[in-house]
Amino acid sequence: MNMTPRLELRHASKSFGRVRALGDGSLQLFPGEVHALLGENGAGKSTLVKLLAGVYQPDSGELLVEGVARRFANPAEARDAGIAVIYQEPTLFADLSIAENIYMGRQPRDRFGRIRYDEMHREVDALLASLGVNLRAQRLVRGLSIADQQVVEIAKALSLDANVLIMDEPTAALSLPEVERLFAIVRALRERDVAILFITHRLDEVFALTQRTTIMRDGMKVYDALTADMTIDAIVSRMVGRDLDTFYPKAEVTPGDVRLSVRNLTREGVFKNISFDVRAGEIVALAGLVGAGRSEVARAIFGIDPVDGGEVKIAGKKLALGHPAAAVRAGLALVPEDRRAQGLALELSIARNASLTVLGRLVRHGLISSRSEATLAADWGRRLRLKAGDLDAPVGTLSGGNQQKVVLGKWLATNPKVLIIDEPTRGIDVGAKAEVYRTLAELVKEGMAVLMISSELPEVLGMADRVLVMHEGRISADIARADANEERVMSAALGASPQALGRAA
């Protein structure tokens, strides 16, 4: 391996007013190496990436490209130096073709100024083929999956001769096959001597893909080593500054009365004959592969999506299906999978988001009491350990983990009997995950019933009293905590017979 870093950041700092976002950002990226960047939300990762990408300029420190000191005034200068960033949510033009997105602003033209589409399509088709994907240059971006949009972003970076690729949480919204395809592309780029910075919260991906790992905490680099020389326990400990012996704080609670009862819930073509109960003081996990129908069942129970048959009862009382407001009044709360699109109004303040579900309680003389709103937000913020300097700041300025806490607090403010929480820790860091688990454990101690939808098997096994596994729109297994293991859950998710599940146990 070439021992000269392709890109190096030395002791960089960056402050915004009195807030120091980065105290000592140091990083070396080498050709042909995948480098993991880890840290809790708020550790300084995003600020460091924006320094590399030319979005911000460091207050102090040094940036070197191929050993030469550089200072990027804007992202265009960083891009011209061969640095490309692939963000978690691609920013493409939906109504243009893949080729038009890749060559935006630099289309090949003839001597009359007309775009040479045939040439552009040939070059993009060759580029996509080199990445081993089944996409065509003339296809519109609209309708492409997030995974395919990321491939388009990677192809765009390569068309610009990028030799440093920064990938920010690229797998957060991908299914397992899509993750495997992305990994194959990353490994191929590594063979081309591209230097890759891979930011993720999934530690299994770190060991599967990367050669070196840098860990940040509180705006500082706290550790840097070969990935092969590290362990999960050591990574977690350094990320949060403490041992997480009680990462899954599942207390033993004797289940009480049935709080949520679902019988023969059916939506044709999506799920069929879904029946289960969730009791007070119980966490029931709904597991399964992407596309099995888990989130759709939750949305139907809450009344967002229509159903073709079935019955839902909350604390013994039949729920009028198809009416979310009736579900809330009955004591049901739903924390959605996509907190940014479905759970928050990003431009509104933290306090307003935290109180949206109970604004009627905060009205005084026809106006919303800002004092009551701030008090409610502060109370839930303390309980959920929200890290926010100003509750009047837009909620979109918070880290992913703190945004999740706001969504959770917003729904807990309704004093629900039943909490449905869909992918509770997707896209949040290890420390924030531990706090979400602590909150769930406290809620069931207080007698709440929790239906947790999760794709994270360790989370399912660590927190659930029972595991309901879905396969192709049906419940294929109901597994008690004592009998649950990864093999049994995965077998049921893949449609194994009950006899096979017994052998897996």
Image: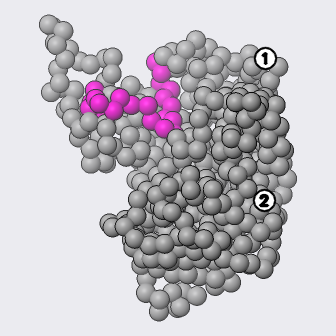
- Name the foreground residue: 249 vs 30: 249
The spot of residue 349 in percent (x, y) is 68, 30
State yes or no: residue 223 in magenta.
no
Q: Earlier in the sequence, mark 1 or mark 2?
A: 1
- Name the foreground residue: 325 vs 267: 325
| For residue 422, side relative to residue 118 (left or right) | right
| For residue 280, side relative to residue 202 (left or right) | right
Height in image: 312 above or below 225?
below
The range drawn in magenta is: 79-100
For image coordinates 59% across by 82% down, the residue present is 479
The spot of residue 444 in percent (x, y) is 76, 67
For image coordinates 21% across by 35% down, the residue present is 138
Task: Please tell me how crowded label 2 is: few (under 14), some (14-19), or many (20+) other residues with Cα within 10 Å.
Answer: some
Callout 1, which amino acid?
Gly
What kind of element bears circle 2? Answer: helix
Task: Please tell me how crowded label 1 is: few (under 14), some (14-19), or many (20+) other residues with Cα within 10 Å.
Answer: few
Callout 2, which amino acid?
Arg
- Name the foreground residue: 433 vs 232: 433
The spot of residue 228 in percent (x, y) is 65, 56
State yes or no: residue 88 in magenta.
yes
For image coordinates 43% across by 56% down, the residue present is 305
Which circle marks residue 438 in the picture? 2
What kind of element bears circle 1? Answer: loop
The spot of residue 124 in percent (x, y) is 26, 33
The residue pinned by badge 1 equals 17
Inter-mark Cα distance, 1 to 2: 33 Å
